[in-house]
Image (cartoon, grey):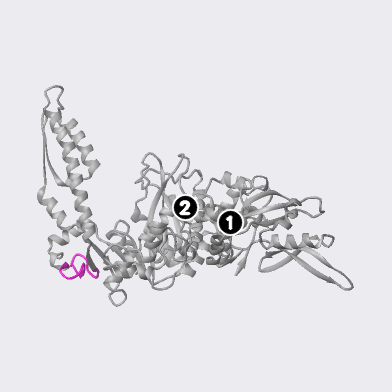
Amino acid sequence: MMCYMVGMYIAVIPNRNSPPAILLRESYREGRQVKNRTLANLSHWPAPRIEALRALLRGEQLGPAKHALPDAFAIERSLPHGHVAAVLGTLKAIALDTLLGKASPPRELVLAMLIERVVSPQSKLACARGLSQATQTSTLGSLLRLPEAVDEDSLYAALDWLLSRQETVESGLAQRHLHEASLVLYDVSSTYFEGHACPLARFGHSRDSRPDRPQIVFGLLTNVEGCPIAVEVFAGNIADPKTLAPQIEKLRQRFGLQHLVVVGDRGMITEARIRRDLAPALLEWISALRAPAIAALARAGVLQPSLFDVRDLAEVSSSEFPGERLIVCKNPLLAEERARKRTELLAATDRELDKIAAASQRPRRPLRGKTRIALRVGKVLDRYHLAKHYRLTLEENAFRYGRDEAGIAAEAALDGVYVIRTNVPEPALSSEQVVRAYKRLSAVERAFRSLKSVDLHLRPIFHHKANRVRAHVFLCMLAYYVEWHMREKLAPLLFDEEDWPAAEQRRASVVAPAQRSISALAKSSSKRNAEGWPVHSFRTLLQDLATLTRNRIVPKDTGMPPFDMLSVATPLQQRAFTLLGLRL
């Protein structure tokens, strides 16, 4: 167990033939050693007052006879402490601090920014104010023994120091969480900028629905459980497949791993990437086919409805994909959803095209000219993305359209069907294991949600220098690394799934949608877990822990110096620290 909180107690020291010395002491940790120091000599206090103070330090309620004790003290200031202690304790328990390097002023500032990103994401200016002693918003600055005044320039310098350590830290994480024959998940996302000064900021495909802002693209490598290993930042206009080659080089050269299975989505591991990047590196991979390739297999007779007479999964082969295994899956619920969505989009497109056709025939100010009509029609088809399902006739003074019913029917026949492709031989991974591995990409998607919006608020980015942007993204990844470990341990108190084997057993097949375990459903319904504790999100649990404060106590007319004392932890807070393996 690791303890990072100050503890105070009353010690009775024998004094030969004289009365014993009564000392107020505190214990603290310095590195791996637990040390003690004396705060005050209470030998001149009357015995009832000493006993009352001992009871107060133990967190006991004071009875009527002891009311005089609180009158002798005043609370000068209370600072939120529990959430910081939980994150700092976890960070040290997983030895992330040692992975960053030996203790130094830049490292301590990086730890402070990392913890601040988990407990209360904010700008570097706000972070500096919260760490400075005069304006501190938690006990973080004092726990890390930071200078009394912290400014944003020192935080920027610490970010530069962190970036210089990125390769070393990522190699250490890979050594911990990856090994030969590991499954490695890789995906990319983007996030937008405020400003245009950064050379990485470019306009591109916005996943944040902010096409009005320049953006960056960043790729995240995780292990099969979704634990982050490495992150890399690219210009905002780079195509997803082009980010793959640097990751392969990172895995092979920097991490020294030769036998890996890279899992990426159909937009990432394309035919060109397989031929140019993965095949020369002799790496195995798992991806999926795009819709046009699936349609081509159907036209060639490779995909037959009879494949799914017995199971929702079948393995086929095709001369178009030599040396590859093709696992065909059909999800009825997905098929139903796609059919519903197509029907609604077709109806919406018809309504808009009818308006254009009517406008071309109206008696007053009719819509005229092929170019003007084509512009109106193009806007509609771009909005609903169904141009392939329509046959259009454009004239100078008329517009007509019709659905391509044959094409719609051919597409509907493949509703719910997807094809996973891999070069991993069957003895290594069965068909079910290949499908399960591909679906594990959802763990990277969860990481992106946490990084960008739910917990860590990576976006929007205000930094102007490319290296500062890279350092900011890397810092956020390390914060998610700590959060990932905390979620694993705190799962009984969170809405998160805590019994993955039971959840997997409730799924009808590996193709069917994921199911939550009975215990997770019960938590979601009752808002309490099996032990009766209230269930939280990760963010609200940190907010609850923050109510565990450290109070600055100033004695009145006793000659004692001021001292710090923790408030009494609630049972829920005690349970959270127990799950984290930390002591109050």
Residue 330 on image: x %, y %: 21, 63
Query: Quick one: label 1 or label 2, which is nearer the N terminus?
Result: 1
Q: Which corner quadrant of the image does residue 381 belong to? A: top left
Tell me: residue 30, above or below residue 235. below
**Hey, what amino acid is under mark 2?**
Asp
Residue 521 visible in image: yes
Q: Residue at x 37, y 62 (%)?
A: 521
| Residue neighbourhood size for the residue with mark 1, other residues' Cα within 10 Å, grouped as few (<14), some (14–19), many (≥20) | many
**Hey, what amino acid is under mark 1?**
Val
Q: Is residue 64 left or right of residue 90?
A: right
Question: Which of the pair 39/119 is nearer the observer?
Answer: 39
Magenta span has 262? no
Query: What secondary structure predominates along the stretch shown in magenta?
Result: loop
Q: Is residue 295 left or right of residue 7?
A: left
Q: Which corner quadrant of the image does residue 88 belong to? A: bottom right
Residue 239 on image: x %, y %: 34, 51
Residue 386 visible in image: no
Question: Which of the pair 159/114 is nearer the observer?
Answer: 114
Q: Which mark is residue 10?
A: none
Residue 214 on image: x %, y %: 41, 42
Residue 42 on image: x %, y %: 81, 61
Q: Which residues are magenta?
A: 308-325
Quarter holding the N terminus is bottom right
Q: Is residue 553 left or right of residue 430?
A: right
Q: Which residue is label 2 attached to?
A: 455
Q: Which mark is residue 84?
A: 1
Tell me: residue 382, above or below residue 288. above
Magenta span has 315? yes
